[in-house]
């Protein structure tokens, strides 16, 4: 998955010679927290809602900044923006992008094309939203977590069992993290499993795998099995 398919576009930008009050108005209007700062079509900086709060010498939220409007109208963007902003290429994968967020401890980045032109913005919030989309959260159903042997054909065996009991698989996340050596963990979002079928699946998975947990989003029930409970 590439950044260009998930970024916000077009990017909402502001000119370096504009005033901070203009930036505050844009952030408020578009419900965002960061603006790329441009000069003659080139990216020269970043301004965030935090920068504006510091400039206003207060902790008030953007929507309550009427009292500071005159002050913010006297401050130029270029006097408080962050220089040398971190960017991400449009053809980066989301995994590469997440790594940049974590290593640099930032919350958002302009997305640039091969000519270094700003074509969008991606934030941590966008990535969180993507996780919800990919896992099917909000659409009820089940999440089934299993630990299985890491061998060819194992995933197909699991998905075939689910489909045999009428399940419709929405997503599968697979990782070796936290799994025993030679094993991997599967996190499967499933729809259309009725309770009798779920009871049978539970029994089968206990026999064939390490069943970690089942979360039934439809009725709000959670069952922990092999998952560590040291919390």
Image (tube, rainbow, N blue to C red):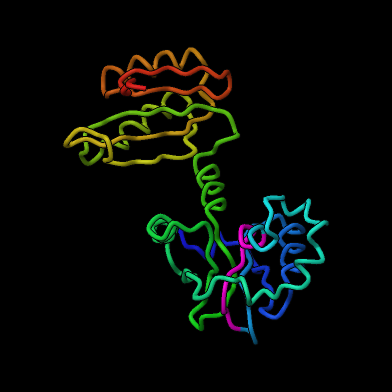
Where residue 81 sits, quadrant-wise, is bottom right
Camera-nearest residue between 42 and 66:
66
Give the residues drawn in magenta, as a range: 42-52
Where residue 82 sits, quadrant-wise, is bottom right
In the image: residue 165, left or right of residue 175: right
Extreme left residue here? 181
Q: How many marks?
A: 0
Residue in view at x 51 percent, y 83 percent = 115
Residue in view at x 48 percent, y 80 percent = 114
Residue 92 at x, y percent in the picture = 43, 66
Q: Compared to 8, does 231 lie above or below?
A: above
In the image: residue 173, left or right of residue 12: left
Q: Compared to 145, does 110 lie above or below?
A: below
Residue in view at x 73 percent, y 77 percent = 18
Q: Is residue 51 magenta?
A: yes
Extreme front residue here? 57
């Amino acid at each position: 998955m590439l950044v260009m398919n998930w970024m916000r576009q077009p990017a909402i930008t502001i000119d370096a010679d504009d005033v901070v009050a203009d930036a505050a108005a844009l952030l408020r209007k578009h419900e965002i927290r960061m603006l790329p700062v441009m000069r003659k079509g080139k990216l020269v900086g970043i301004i965030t809602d935090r920068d504006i709060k510091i400039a206003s010498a207060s902790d008030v939220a953007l929507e309550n900044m009427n009292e500071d409007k005159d002050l913010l109208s006297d401050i130029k963007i270029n006097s408080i923006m962050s220089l040398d902003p971190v960017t991400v290429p449009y053809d980066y994968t989301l995994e590469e992008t997440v790594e940049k967020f974590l290593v640099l401890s930032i919350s958002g980045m302009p997305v640039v094309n091969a000519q270094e032109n700003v074509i969008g913005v991606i934030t941590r919030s966008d990535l969180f939203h993507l996780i919800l989309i990919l896992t099917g959260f909000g659409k009820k159903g089940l999440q089934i977590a299993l630990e299985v042997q890491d061998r060819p054909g194992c995933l197909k065996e699991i998905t075939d069992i689910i489909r045999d009991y009428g399940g419709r698989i929405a997503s599968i996340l697979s990782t070796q993290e936290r799994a025993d050596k030679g094993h991997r963990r599967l996190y499967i979002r499933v729809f259309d499993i009725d309770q009798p079928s779920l009871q049978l699946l539970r029994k089968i998975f206990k026999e064939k795998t390490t069943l970690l947990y089942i979360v039934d989003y439809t009725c709000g029930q959670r069952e922990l099995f092999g998952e560590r409970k040291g919390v």
